[in-house]
Amino acid sequence: MAMLDVTGLGISFGGLRAVDDFSLKIEKGELYGLIGPNGAGKTTVFNLLTGVYKPSDGVIILDGKNITGQKTTQINKEGIARTFQNIRLFKELTVLDNVKVGLHNDYPYSTIAGILRLPSYRKQEAIMKEKAMELLKVFDLDKECDYLASNLPYGKQRKLEIARALATNPKLLLLDEPAAGMNPNETKELMETIRLIRDKFDMTILLIEHDMKLVSGICEELTVLNFGQVLAQGKTSDVLNNPDVIKAYLGDD
Amino acid sequence: MNKQLKDNLITYGIIIAFYAIMQTLSATGSLSSLFKGLLVPVCVYTIMAVSLNLTVGILGELSLGHAGFMCIGAFVSAFFSMCLKNSGMNSIVRFIIAILLGALVSAVFGVLIGIPVLRLRGDYLAIVTLAFGEIIKNIVNVLYIGKDENGMHLSFTDTASLNMSADGEVIVKGPQGITGIPNDSTFTIGIIVLLLTIAIVINFVNSRSGRAVMAIRDNRIAAESVGINISKYKLMAFAISASMAGAAGALYSHNLNNLMAQPKNFGYNMSIMILVYVVLGGIGRIRGSIIAAAILTVLPELLRGFSDYRMLIYSIVLIVMMLFNCAPAALELREKYSLKRLFGKKLKKEEA
């Protein structure tokens, strides 16, 4: 059974059909890429999957469960976590606290326990800290755990966002242009990190990216979106050699 | 964690030191009666500032109706004390229940008002909270409650329409408010409530719920994406803030004989005054709020000797404090001469 099964997804904003008849199937543990020209509707697809927008048509099934039209918070609890194209960290919180916020729903001690510092607070906070530090270590951020998130360099902010998303213990991870604004070295490092996440956490990953080196380097399958519609879908090498895709997106030289 | 603990201990230490000094001074008789009269108000306004800081600094929403919650706490607790005034109950026990009741009812109103208000953001939220603050004050001004052998009587027009029997007692008399409230507020209780307030705020901020609230403040969309229930935590912070304002109101009302809801004590002027304490003390900084509120409560009274120039000096102090806290040059200077530098600032230097 597929981890994510989307059929006939569509949304209109007034007269604009931003995404139309979008279908996608991602198997468990797969690294899947979503590419296409600017304004093709890639981020809109992410927003539909995470419940930021309600789809006008279509069905989204995550791991056998229909999650169409649910709220963002609920969808996260069902198992989809995401990062954002323009980094959205909790800037005034420390790096450690950013990840702890991601662990929020897994350690549900009550507010009263928190205010009175009851044993449940101490116990769960200790586990939270341990788990958060473990995650930060994977991303090589453990030394910076006391820094404010806004004081991290750009590349590390991207990593922290991924760490925070992983803290919610998702089944499916959505990465929205993780390599945006990175230099070739950072991109290379990021590729390794993404592969590492997939292997270490046995994660299914869907990513939007413009960096073709990254896409062809790590994605196993691709979907190309153009004007809200699927232009091509399939194995990475096949898709990248598809003449339609070359014409619409890659450009021939 | 260690650094944070140290920070909190300093905050508690300042208050306890302040309490000790004031108690010694008043025991040796070197405290003027004017100053003695200010001790409870200092506690009241410090609690108000700390609680508003929870809404403005931690939740990140500008509320201009905080005095309204103080008004609710003041009237509910005073009414309770009046009802039990002649019951022979121990005055301290009665006062503690009165404070808790004031806090509880304020929290309930915090939730009721918070549900519609917290759907708004920014300036709109500020305007609507301002309106709610005024509404509370004006309703209290037309409220008449009396007690006789048949039970409670309530009216929104005048004393006559309460239809009381001859030996009944009118407790809340509209614009004249409540008279003859037992003077239960003492400096000691004030300080205890203040310490409790600070402990609640600090512990809340460092718990899972507090982190969720700050996450919402920093980035609502991201908070939603990691599964945080936005309305729940916003409402929670708002209600806790309101309940502490209610406790402050209880302290305030039991420090007076006649409690009336006037523009100068529960109007928007007071709400903005409290906001001034918070802003000058540093938004989101608990200790700053305490110091700013204490200084700015005492200052106008100390400056009475200057008569006409009083408000002039007061405003100069406000401007100086603002510069000290916000002007880039002043911040640089403070940075240069501060003993311990924050971690984040260090990082910036390493990069440069």
Image: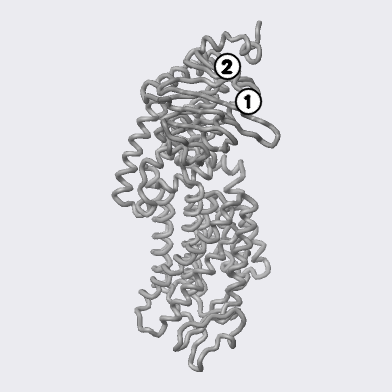
Can you identify the residue that label 1 sits on? A228
* Subunit of label 1: A
Picture mark count:
2
Indicate the secondary structure of the residue bearing disc 2. Answer: strand
| Crowd class of label 1 (few under 14; some 14 to 19; many from 20; radius 10 Å) | many
Q: x, y percentage for residue B146?
A: 51, 84
| Residue at 42% across, 28% down | A141
Q: x, y percentage for residue A217?
A: 49, 13
| Crowd class of label 2 (few under 14; some 14 to 19; many from 20; radius 10 Å) | many
Q: Is residue A143 left or right of residue B326?
A: left
**Is residue B277 or residue B71 the one in the foreground?**
B71
The answer for how far apart the CA atoms under marks 1 and 2 are is 12 Å
Residue type at mark 2 is Ala
**Rendered position, A31 above or below B349:** above
- Disc on res. B341: none
Indicate the secondary structure of the residue bearing disc 1. Answer: loop
Q: x, y percentage for residue A214?
A: 51, 15
- Disc on res. A232: 2
The C terminus of chain B appears in which quarter of the rendering? top right
| Residue at 49% across, 69% down | B73
